[in-house]
Image (tube, coloured by chain):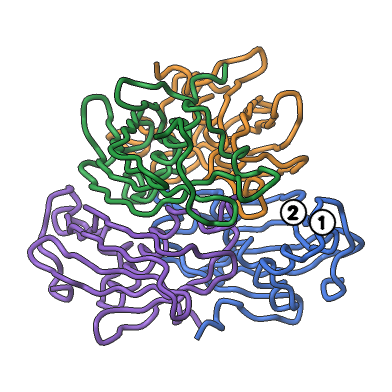
Chain colours: A blue, B purple, C green, D orange
Amino acid sequence: MSDHFTGELTENGHRLVQRVYYEDTDFSGAVYHARYLHFMERARTEFIRCKGLIQSESHATDNPADAVAFMVGRIEIDYRRPARMDDVLTITTEPLRAKGARMVLSQKIHRGEELLIEAQVTVACVNGLGRPRRLPESLL
Amino acid sequence: MSDHFTGELTENGHRLVQRVYYEDTDFSGAVYHARYLHFMERARTEFIRCKGLIQSESHATDNPADAVAFMVGRIEIDYRRPARMDDVLTITTEPLRAKGARMVLSQKIHRGEELLIEAQVTVACVNGLGRPRRLPESLL
Amino acid sequence: MSDHFTGELTENGHRLVQRVYYEDTDFSGAVYHARYLHFMERARTEFIRCKGLIQSESHATDNPADAVAFMVGRIEIDYRRPARMDDVLTITTEPLRAKGARMVLSQKIHRGEELLIEAQVTVACVNGLGRPRRLPESLL
Amino acid sequence: MSDHFTGELTENGHRLVQRVYYEDTDFSGAVYHARYLHFMERARTEFIRCKGLIQSESHATDNPADAVAFMVGRIEIDYRRPARMDDVLTITTEPLRAKGARMVLSQKIHRGEELLIEAQVTVACVNGLGRPRRLPESLL
C-alpha cells in the first residue's frame, strides 16, 4: 500500500504524482512559488530511491567519509502557469548529465497536459564531511 | 493513477498514507513538530473529499453565503515519538462528534504499529463571509 | 542591528514581534493554522536565548550525554481569530511550571490588542541521546 | 518597535536582516534549499513596502482590474554555502531592470561577509484578473 509514493521509472527518468494541499497555497489563491521546489525535491528523493538509494540510510554510515548526501548547487526555474488547491501534479525528472560528483536534472511539473513549471537542477554529491564525492554508480 | 491520494474510508473514518520528506525534518534529525499538523490537514482534506466535498470548489460558489469552508478551532496534540526522514506514516481520522457548525475529530499518526501522534481537532464550518454555517449533511 | 530578533524579557516571560508574509498564508486568505506553531517556536527559541541558551550550540557538545535539546511534548491551541498577510504579531511566552525535565509555557499571539491565538505548550528537555535530562538552571 | 521588519533602503536597493529558526533547517543540519526563497520573498515584500506598496492592500481593490499583484516568473539561484540554525542572514535586493510589467532583481544572502546565496529573480506585475499590468511608478 505504500508503493505509490515512489512513483515509477520511465524511459528517460522518473515520474511522480502529487496532490496540492492547503499548505501549498498562499493568499493569492495559487501555490506559493517556493513550494514547487518541495514537489521537485520529493520527486528527486523518489527517483534516487528507485535507483536503490535511501537517503536517511546513506547519510548515516559509520564512517562519515563513506556517507552519500546530495546538495542542491543551482536551480533555474520558470513559472509558466500557477497550480491551485486540489490540483493533481505530475513531476517528471530526467537526468541531462551526470559526471564525477555532479548531476544536472531536467524537472517539469504538469497538470494533465498543461506545463506549469520547467526547471533545471544541479545536484552535488558530498560525503558526511561535506566533501565532494563521486556519484553512486547507479546514478552515473 | 491519482486515486491513492484520497486514502480510503474505514469503518470508523478514514486512513491516509504519507511519506516523510526532507522538507518535513529539522536539524534535530526528526520531523519538525508543526509538520504533523500538515499531515493531519491533508488527511482531513481527503476524508471530506471521500464524503463528496472538494474544498477548492465549495469555497468558490457564486454566492459567498452558500460557500462551505472549514476553520480549525482548537487542537490538542500529544507527541509520543518522533517520525524521521523516509518514514511511511498512516494518518487515521475518526469523527467523535459532529453537530451544527462544529465537528470534533480524533486523528492519529502511526509508523507501522507504533503510535507517534495523538490529536483531537475541532473544526468549524463557515460560509464565504466567515459566518458559522451548518455542516454539510454528508458530515453529520 | 541583529538585536531586535531576540525580542525582550518581560516581567512574566518574553515578548517577540513578527510580521506575517506570503509564506504564512493559504488560499483561504488567512494564515495557515500550522504556521502559528512556527511563530510560537521562534518565540521559545528567542526566550531561551535571552536565558543564555543557544540551541545550535547546546545540541552540539562533544559528549552527547551533556547536550541540551528541547522537544515539544504536547500543545493545546485555541484559534480565536485569523491573522492575515502583512499583520504584525506579538507573541508572548510565559512559563507556567518548570520542574525536572519538563516545562509548561503559556503562549499567546496578539495583533495589537486583539487576541488571536492562545496556547499551552509542554516542552521536554532531552540530552543528545534522546534521554530526559534536568532543565538548565536558568530555566528553572 | 515594529519598524525593524521593513529593513532599509540602500543606495542600490534594500537590505533586510533575518534569523534562521528550526523551521528553516532540515535533517542534513543545514537550511532546506527552498527556504532561501522564503527569505528572498520577505525581502522583496519589505523592499516594495519601502516603495509605498502594501501587498495585502494592493491585492484588494474594489475593481480587480486596478489591483496590483506580483508573480515570480523565473528564478536562477546558486547555492554557494549552507546557512545553519541561529544564523543571522542579510538579504540584499537590487533592481537590475524594470520595464513595462516586469522587473529583474538581483538578490543575495550573506552571513556576515560570507556570500551564501546568489539569485536573479524575475517578477511580473499582474492585476486582479491575472493580466499583465504596468509596474507601479515607484518601482520603475
Q: Where is residue A129 in the image (x, y as percent from the top left)?
A: 81, 52
- Quadrant of the image occupied by residue D109: top right
Most foreground residue, A41 or C38: C38
Label 2: few (<14), some or many (≥20) within 10 Å?
A: some
- Give residue C8's quadrant in the image: top left
Residue at image mark 1 = A126
Chain for numbered disc 2: A
Q: Which residue is drawn at 28% across and 29% down?
A: C111
Q: Which residue is drawn at 44% across and 80% down?
A: B113
How far separated are the C-alphas under marks 2 and 1? 7 Å
With respect to residue D52, does C85 lie above or below?
below
Counting from the top left corner in percent of width and height, residue A135 is at 86, 65
Amino acid residing under circle 2 = Met
Q: In which quarter of the image is the C terminus of chain A?
A: bottom right
Q: Which of marks 2 and 1 is in front?
A: 1
Q: Can residue A102 be seen in this view?
A: yes
Sequence-wise first label, 2 or 1: 2
Q: Mark 2 points at which residue?
A: A71
In the depicted structure, whether residue D23 falls above or below residue A104: above
Q: How many labels does the image show?
A: 2
Furthest residue toward right: A100
The amino acid sitting under disc 1 is: Val
* Residue C35 visible in rendering: no
Residue drawn where x is 20% and y is 43% of the image: C80
The one nearer the camera, C84 or D70, is C84
Whether tag 2 and tag 1 are in contact, CB under 8 A, the answer is yes
Give the left or right position of residue A94, taking residue A81 as reference. Answer: right
Q: Is mark 2 on a helix, strand or loop?
A: strand
Which of the chains bears the disc numbered 1? A
Write down the quadrant of residue B48 in the picture. bottom left
Query: Could you tell me which residue is drawn at 71 percent across and 37 percent down?
Result: D117
